[in-house]
Structure formats: C-alpha cells, structure tokens
Image (cartoon, rainbow, N blue to C red):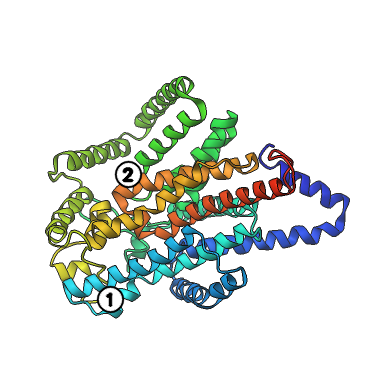
Amino acid sequence: MKPGAENGKDRRLIAKNPHLDAVGMKRLIWRGLIALALTLTFRTFQFFPGMFYVQESWFALCFLAVLFAYPFWKIWSGLRFSSFEVYLFVLMSVGTILAAGRAQQVFGQPLMYGTLSQRAMVLIAALLIGVNLLRCGKIAPGDIEAALLFLAWSNFVLFGTMRLLLNPSNFAAYGDGFVTLSMPGTEPSFKFQSSFILFGVFYYAILGLRTKRTKYYLAAAVLFPVTLGGSGRGLTVCVGATLLFCLYRVRGLRSASFAAVKFICIVMMLGGVSYAIFPAFLSARISRFSDAFTTVLTGSATQDSSATARLFETLAALPYIREHPFFGNGVISQQWHGGAGAVMGEYFFASDIGVVGVVFTYGALGSLLYLMQYRFALVAARKPVDSRHRPLLDATKAFILFSALYSLETGLCVWSAEVTLCFIALLCGISAEEAAVESSLFRNGKICNSPRPA
C-alpha cells in the first residue's frame, strides 16, 4: 500500500458515511495527545522561555503515573511483566542510585542534589505506559507514525523560522540549554532538540530508497539542514553512515555501490557550486571538520575552540576514571556549588565528551547497563513485521542505529535515554503486537498470512 493510501480511504468512507466524521475527529484528537506526550517526554522545549514549569509538571505527572496508575494497571492485567519493562525499572533505579550515591561519595554532594538532577528518569514511566498501550491495541502504530511526522514538520518550521529571524546572541541570558556557550572564535547558536526532524529525515530517505521516488529524497534533503546546530560535524557523519548502511540493506551490495558512487558525485558537484557561491562559509566548515579529526586522531589542540575544549575535558576526566573505573563518579548538579566545572576547578561538562563522559559518570558497569537497551532493539529488529508498518519501522530502526553511533560523541543514549528508549519501546511494542496477532491466528485455526484486521 502506498503511503497515505489508508488516509485517503478513510476520507472516502467519511464522505459516504457522515457519521464516521466523529470517529475521524476522535482519532485526530488522540494523535494530538500522542504528539503532546512525545514532545514533553523528549524534552523538546524544556529550555525554551516560559517552559520550565510545564516540563517540571510533566515530570511530576510521570512520577505519579509510575507510582499509582501503572501498578494498578499491571495488577488488573495479571502482573505480567516483559523483560523490557523489568529493564526499564532497573535502569531508573540503578541510574539514579549511581548518579546520586557516587557523587556524594566522591565529591561530598548531598544526596538530594544528585537525586533531583536525575528527575528526568521518571520520563521512562511514560514509556512503560506506552509499551502497554501498544501491546493491548489502545495505540495503533499508524497513530504514532502520524504524530511523529507531524512533529517532524512542525519542528522544522519552528526551528527554521527561529534560525532565520532571530539572533541567538539576544537570548544568551536564558542559559546554555537554549543557546550554546560563546567560545573564542565561535558565535552562539540555538540548541534545538532535533530528534523528531531526524526521524523525518530517515523516514523519507529510506522511503525514497525503497520506492525510488524523488519527492521523498527531496523531503529528507529539506528537513536535514535544520538539524545542524553549531558545527553539526558529528551528526552529519553519523547520519551519513546510517543512511549508507540502510542503502546497502535495501538495495544490496551491487546496486548500493553504484548508488553510493552517484551520490558522492552529486555531492561533489553541489559542493563545487556552493564553494563558488559561499567560499568563506564552506572553507570555514571544512576547516572545522579538519580540526576535529586532527584533535581526535592526534590528541593535540587546534584552532577549533570547541574541539580543543573537549580535549581538555577528556584529560580532566581521565584521572577520575582511573580512580573509580567501575561505578563512576556520579552526576554533579548545576545547583550545587556552581556545577561540575566549579567543583573540579576547570571547565567541564560530562555530556560534552561522549562515551568518556558516560564512563566518568556511571563507570564501566553503569555504562553497560545503559548499553543493554540496544540488545532489546536488536532482538526486536530481527522479528518479521507486517508490511503496513514498514516505513515506520525502517525509520525507527535507522534512528536507533544513528543514536548508537552518535552516542560515541555525545552520549545520547545516556543523557537523553528517554529518546532512544522511546524508539526502542516502539520497536518492541510493534513486534509484540505482531506476535500477538500471529498467535491469535494460529489459535483460531487460520494461516499466518491471513488478512489482518485494519
């Protein structure tokens, strides 16, 4: 079935049966609620002006949900827990204990500061609710797909407009969460949570690979530039690697190799045209890529202040990692004595230095606990699925792969665990739903390729 065909069918049915319009309106409202829940769970606007109390209220609501609503739901359903649900509970508990307890032991930070700094862990409670709603059929994968695509395009419009019309320097007072810190040789830029837009990039790019239709490639190309905040070097490399892997999976080795060569030629041609129009801008971008690779490969400082700062942050973290290799040093709250930089006596943010920062904070054992999320993704990705969900699942799998690669630089799967776990929960939920349908067909004496209910 072509993308959008199901929606077209719904519209024709409503035209013939006006009483179905109420059903369509309920579905629209339901998808709007899903989009709102995803936005708050991903903390998309957490640092926007005036959004602090809205986000904190969502934290509280999720905490109440896991404390009261979720237990009653599980009791009513027979106290059956999936291994993924158990993992989420363990991650919430152990992650908070390591963050707060280790910071108290190593730096003397009171437990309350460390615990409150981990309050975003309660967002995983929303995933517990979501997994069960998917499993029992209360949420349809198509509703989630529609909500994600709406968020991709709405965020694209909002973030693109802000970058075009607003000067980030005028918003420096709102802190590092909304704009980047100003460093020598760099200008402040907006810090946007671009996960939804990246999902859209993968959705349309892979749809283009499967259908070979230009409009999907164009949609992905339009969305992608808005995700590039700051330098965008690591993100560009990881998105490219992810799409290259998907290309080989979809087209096969021979066809993918020809397509990759054609794509490289097109990029080179566009790069030449861009250099002729914007030589200074493109030269600066290439120089920053070069400086970043030089810093990573040689460990020496360069003229790129961002790459050099991460080098010194890594050097500052290494003694603490050697001293506490297994359980880490915990999370230092920004509200306690000025944060990690003030406590350690130098510029330092663990979230800046990717996997090194993760090991610094949680140690080797805590890092392995976070990495276990990808084991669930790998198991669920191997299960056969209904072709109706293929575009959604293709984009979900691509985002999960991207997050694993990008986490090497940014620690995305730890510092924004609710984002990666949400897509893994979606993958596991759809796989469980498909397994339930197959089991039901067998129990009813039907073959597995019988038509599934719409």
Which amino acid, by three-letter code, is at mark 1?
Gln
Residue wearing tag 2: 234
* Nearer to us in this view, 14 or 178: 14
Let me know if residue 320 appears in the view.
yes
On the question of residue 349 being in view, the answer is no
- Closest to the observer: 74 or 362? 74
Establish if 334 lies above or below 363. Answer: below
Question: For numbered disc 2, what is the local secondary structure?
Answer: helix
Q: Are marks 2 and 1 in contact (CB under 8 Å)?
A: no
Mark 2: amino acid: Gly
Picture residue at 16% right of the left edge, 62% below the top:
324
User: How far from the left and from the top, in percent, is residue 257?
Assistant: 43, 22
Residue 112 point in image, percent of width and height: 30, 80
Q: CA distance from mark 2 to mark 1?
A: 30 Å
Q: Quadrant of residue 188 in the image? A: bottom left
Q: Is residue 375 above or below residue 258?
A: below
Residue 313 image point, x, y percent: 18, 56
Relative depth, front residue between 452 and 36:
452
